[in-house]
Each structure stands twice: as structure tokens, then as C-alpha cells.
Image: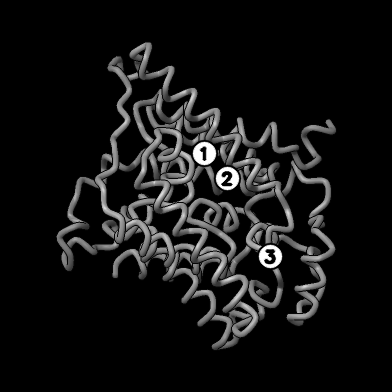
Amino acid sequence: MKYFKFLLVGVLFVIVLSKAEIIFWYGIYEMFRFESFYIYGVIGSAVLIGIVMVQIMKRIEFKGTHGEQVQFVPKSFSVPRYLFGGIIFGLGWAMVGACPGPVFILLGKGVISILVVILGALVGTFL
Amino acid sequence: MELILKPWPLYLAGPGIAVVMGLLVYFGKSFGVSSNLRTMCSLAGAGKYAECFKFDWKSQIWNLIFVAGAMIGGYIAHNYLTESHQINLNPNTVNSLKELGFTNIGAAYMPQGIFGVDVLFTVKGWLYLLTGGMLVGFGTRYAGGCTSGHAISGLSNLQVPSLIAVVGFFIGGLVMTHLLLPFIV
């Protein structure tokens, strides 16, 4: 089962996010009002550890399960594209209080109306 | 048991996310959830209409499986790992929501006025959720990533484009929360 591990990582990801309580509309609203430091702390600490992890992996030429050195693909540079896309995303993020990961988690949690958001996201992606 | 049922402090949650990213890298992939939206569009046949949806979606199966895991995880977390579904919020946040006319604040994950099942029977409810979803979908596609791909993976790899995108996320989020939401909820 070469895909089974991804299922497990997906489950792990969500248990972490759920325990962190950062996938709720209220939490995102609170964050954008700067009335809670929590989500900033979670993302900040994830990034700090991520930076150290990526640097170490690059230094020691870390090999993945596929037997080759793991690759980190740099993103091509453009200011307007990322800024404009980012702003549009941010507007939607604050509206529905969920980004592309959490929408699927919320579906798993039984929030039926999130299907409309997913439908909208697919249409938006297509546009 | 405490640890399993109670919300986690951020010094557990943050590193947990980093571990998820690390595992995906170890498996030769990269952490980014929004690619799945593109894959799903391709599966739905979008390749007929736009060139950029014509790609080998089979190489993305792992990511769809990851999302399936996320849904299962959501179910498990919701039913077995959560002691209370009451959300603790800053009193200032609660007051501001009261002023906007919200009720039962923090009683469920999502405000019922926006996500309750009854909104599915109103035009306004559909419009709100569809618009929000479309902004998320379009923005993430245009910026080439979302919170996981840019804010976590990109910043971890010290990518300037990701920093620009994250700044954009916040400009958009702040404008919506402070200037627009009071008029549209």
C-alpha cells in the first residue's frame, strides 16, 4: 500500500490541527482582530522548526523514502502575482474562516454547508 | 488522557505541523493542500477548457489520499478526541461579534448564522459561502499556494514569494475582518 502512509499523515495532520483549534471560523476572526496570539504562535513555531528542518535536510543531503535526496522547489518570483493572489485569498479566508485544508476537515466533522464553500473554491480555482 | 481530550498548547501544535511537513518531504512530496483543488478540477474534466488543467493528475493521487485522511481525521477528532465543543474566545472578540448580531458565540466550531444547515435554504447563505469559497479558490490558484504551501512550506524554505503571499493573506484578511464583514454578515 504505497499510498497508505499519506492517509495516515493526513489523519495526523488533522488531529494536530484539531487539537490546536485553529480551524474554526471564530479562531480566524479572533486572529485577524489581534485578540489572540495563539494561531500566530502555532504558525510561527511551525515555521521556525520548519526552517531548521529544511536547512538540516539540505546540509546533510537527506534522502527520502524514494532513495533520492529530497528536493525543495523554489518558487518563481513575481510580486504582483503573489500579492494580488494573496489578498484575494485573504479576503475569502476571513469570510469562510477556513483555508483549503480545513474545509475538508470540517466536512469530516460534519459541517455540511462547507460543501458550498468547496464548490465555490473549485469554481474559483477553475477561473 | 488530558493531552488527548484537551486543546493543545501552541508548543505542541506548531511542532506537530512541522512534523507533518517533514514526513511529506521524507516521502518525497511537498506539503501543500490547495494543489488538490486543481487536481479535482482536472478530474472533473477542466482539462478540456484550460491548458493548465491538463497535467498528470495521477502524480497527485497521494495528495488526494492525504485529504481523504484529513476527512477521516476530522471525523475521529470530532467524535473521539474532543471533550468539549465550546470554543474559548477573547471577551473582546465575543463583544464585537455580539455587536454584529451573532448569537451562541463559540457554542460550535462555526457560527450557525453562516454555516448552520438552515442557511442552505437561503439565497444569502449560498451567496456568502460560494463567494468566500471562490475567493479562496481563485486566490490560492493565482498565488500558487495557501496557508500550508506558502506560510508553512514556503517560509520554511525561506522563499521570498511565499512571504509576499503571506503578507497578501493578511492584507486581505484584515480588510475583510475589519472593513467588509460588518456589512455583509
Vertical order, B128 against A92 (above or below): below
Amino acid carrying label 2: it is Ile
**In the image, which is nearer the foreground, mark 2 or mark 1?**
1
Q: Secondary structure at mark 2?
A: helix
**Residue that numbered label 1 is attached to:** A10
Mark 3 and mark 1 in contact? Answer it, CB < 8 Å: no
* Three-letter amino acid code of the residue under disc 3: Met
Disc 2 target residue: B72
- Mark 3 vs mark 2: give the one in front: 3
| Chain under numbered label 2 | B
Q: How far apart are the alpha carbons under marks 2 and 1? A: 8 Å
Residue at 83% x, 46% y is B83
Nearest to the eye among marks 3 and 1: give it: 3
- Image quadrant in which you'd find residue A14: top right
Left or right? Give the position of B79 relative to B141.
right
Q: Secondary structure at mark 3?
A: loop
Name the residue: 63% across, 80% down.
Answer: B119
A36 versus A116 height, above or below: above
Residue B69 at x, y percent in the picture: 52, 41
Label 3 to label 1: alpha-carbon separation:
22 Å
Disc on res. B110: 3
Drawn side of residue B57 relative to residue B133, left or right: left
Say if mark 2 contacts mark 1, CB within 8 Å.
Answer: yes
Cα separation, mark 3 vs mark 2, equals 19 Å
Whether residue B127 sits left or right of residue B75 in the image: it is left
Dot 3 crowding, Cα within 10 Å, few <14, some 14–19, many 20+ = many
> Which chain does the residue under circle 3 lie in?
B
The earlier-in-sequence mark between 3 and 2 is 2
Pick the quarter of the image with the C terminus of chain B: bottom right
Mark 3 touching mark 2, by CB under 8 A?
no
